[in-house]
Image: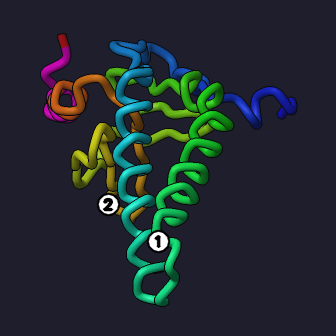
Amino acid sequence: MSENLIHSMTPTSPLADGEHVVYSFHPDRAAYWRDHAWLAAGAMAIGMVILWAMGNPHVWTGAVGGLAAVAVRAFYVASDEMQARWDLTDRRLLGPQTRAVFLKDIQTIRTLGSAVQIVTRSGDKHLLKYQADRDATRQRIEAAKAGALS
């Protein structure tokens, strides 16, 4: 397998004979930044609480540290995360690199923030992150699983 395919943020699994892509799920930039804003707010609060509990007189530095940590991560991985794509076929859900889940093997579909979590019967978990409309994503996968593809 070539180096580019190993690190690809798009599906690299080949389609089976007669299989076709019905829909592609792409991350939403606004959802990405909104999720990171919530993550930063939480990190800032936790940092301040930890410093307060330790008796540090400079509690405000916890907010600065929490914000800085999340901001660095957000800017560092944004370009990769915005390239991720999941393809829904008439048989499978294909994710970045070689991730592939047969629709019949999906046991649970949950929403977490702007993400949709897929849990297989064997316990594997996959996240379709930063969806603009997580409920629509979940419903589309559920419909495909039920055989009601449009």
Query: Residue 143: x percent and y percent?
Result: 15, 28
Distance Cα–Cα, label 1 vs label 2: 46 Å
Query: Can residue 89 be seen at all in this image of the molecule?
Result: yes
Identify which residue is drawn at 76% across, 29% down: 5
Q: Would residue 49 appear left or right of 74 to someone viewing this image?
A: left
Quadrant of the rendered image containing residue 10: top right
Query: Residue 76: x percent and y percent?
Result: 68, 37
Task: Pick whichever, 15 or 117, lies toward us.
Answer: 117
Query: Residue 75: x percent and y percent?
Result: 62, 34
Q: Would residue 84 appear left or right of 3 to someone viewing this image?
A: left
Identify which residue is drawn at 64% across, 30% down: 80
Query: Can residue 97 be seen at all in this image of the molecule?
Result: no
Query: Residue 17: x percent and y percent?
Result: 50, 17
Identify which residue is drawn at 64% across, 37% down: 77
Residue underneath mark 2: 121
Tag 2's secondary structure?
loop
**Labelled disc at residue 59:** 1
Task: Pick whichever, 134 or 94, lies toward us.
Answer: 134
Quadrant of the rendered image containing residue 136: top left
Q: Which residues are magenta?
A: 140-149
Amino acid carrying label 2: it is Arg
